[in-house]
Image (cartoon, rainbow, N blue to C red):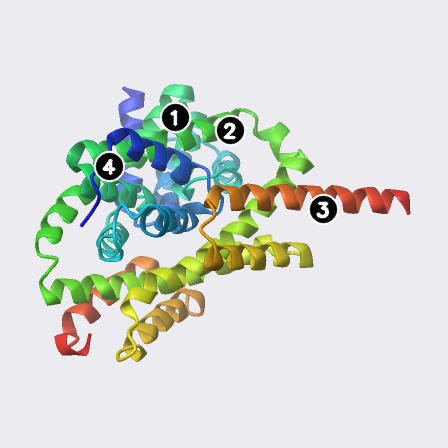
Amino acid sequence: MSKRVSVLRIAELFIRYANFTFGGGSASTAVLHRELVARKGWIDDSQFGLCYALSRLTPGTNLLAFCTSVGWVLRGFTGAVVALLAASVPCAIIVVLMTVGFNQISRNPTWMIVIQGATTAAVGITVVTCWTIAKPHVKRTNWILPLMLVGLAFGAKALMNISSVQILFAAVIVGLLLPINRR
Amino acid sequence: MKLVVLYLVLLKATITSFAGLASLPVVREELVVKGQLLTDTQLNEAVVITRMTPGPVGLYVVTVGYYALGIPGACAGWLAMVSPALSVIPLVHFVGKKYDHPRVRMVLQSVVLASAGLLLAASIPLATAALTDPLMLLIALVTIVLLLRTKIDTLWIILAAGTTSYVFSTARLLLVGLI
C-alpha cells in the first residue's frame, strides 16, 4: 500500500529529484526509486514495478509518465498533475536558460568539469538501480529466468542495437506466454 | 496559429516515440526539411544542450520550440513533451485494478526485468562519455558503494561528485602549471 502523502511533499520530491539529476531520464528514475522506495517508503517495490513498467510502455518521455503514474498512485489525479508539473517545469526553465546562454556556457571549462563529475555519479546510480529494480523479482528458487530476461534485453540493446520499444513489446509477449507457475 | 501548428508538430513527434531522442527524425522532417523553422545546427545544439542539463533527454523539444518561436515556442515544446505522459493515468488506473491477476503481474514483471537490462545498456554510453580517467572511475565506484551501503540523499552524492571532479581537476591543472 502507498502512504498518504501531501501534495506539497509530492511536489517537493519531484522538483528535487526529477529535475537535478544529470544523465537523462534513466538516471533520474534511478534516483527516484531510491527516494520513493528505499528512503521514504511512499510506495513499495510492486507499486514501483507497476508504475515503471507502464511508463515504459507509454509514448513520449518515460520519466514524465513515471512521475505522473507515481503521483496518481499517491494522490489520484491531483497527485498526477502535481508530479508532472513538478517534474517538468523547473528542468524546462533550466533548459531555456541554458539555450539562451549556450555559447558562453559550452565554452566554460569549469561547468563542463562539474557536469562530467555529476554524470559519472549518474553512471553509478544507473548501474546500482538496474540491480535494485530487478532484485525483487530474483528469488532464491527462481533466479535463472529473471536474470536471463535482464541479460537478453541488455544484449539486444547493447550488442544488437534493437530499439527499446521492440524489446519492451517482446517482454510483454514473453510475459503473456510464460507459464504462471514458473514465476 | 504558428504556435498551435508548432505544438501539434512536436506533439506528433513525442506521441509517436517511446524514448527521449526517438522523436528526432519527425522533428527534423517537419521543422528542418518541410517547415524550415529550424536549421540542422540548431537541432544538434538542442540535443547537446539537453545532454548538458539535468532532467530527461526529451527536454530537447523545449529548446527546439525556443529556437523556432522564442519563449512561446518553448512553452509549446514543453506542452508537447508533457501531454503524452497523461496517457499513463488510465493505464495505471485499469491495470492497477487487475494487478493481483497472475498474468498481469507476469507481464509487468517481464517488462520491469527487460527495463533493468535496458537501464544497464543505457549506462554504457554514459560511462563512455564520463569515465575518461582514473579519477572519474573512482568517483563512479565510490558512488556505487555509497548507494549500496548508505542512505545518503542522492542529490548530495551527485553534488559531491561534481565538486570532487572540479577540485581535483583544478588541483591537477595547478600542479601542471607549477611543474
Alpha carbon of mark 1 to alpha carbon of mark 2: how far? 10 Å
Q: Taking A141 as reference, is B136 left or right?
A: right
Q: Mark 1 lies on which chain?
A: B
Mark 1: amino acid: Ala
Is there one chain holding both mark 3 and mark 1? Answer: yes
Pick out the residue farthest to the front.
B150
Is there one chain holding both mark 1 and mark 2? Answer: no
Question: For residue B168, which numbered disc appears in the image?
Answer: 3
Is there one chain holding both mark 1 and mark 4? Answer: no
Q: Mark 3 lies on which chain?
A: B
- Residue that carries the numbered disc 1 in the rendered image: B74
Pick out the residue farthest to the right.
B179
Alpha carbon of mark 1 to alpha carbon of mark 4: how far? 32 Å
Mark 3 or 1 closer to N-term? 1
Could you tell me residue B41's position as x and y percent? 53, 36
Is there one chain holding both mark 4 and mark 3? Answer: no
Question: For residue A117, which numbered disc appears in the image?
Answer: none
**Contact between labelled residues 2 and 1, with CB atoms less than 8 Å apart:** yes
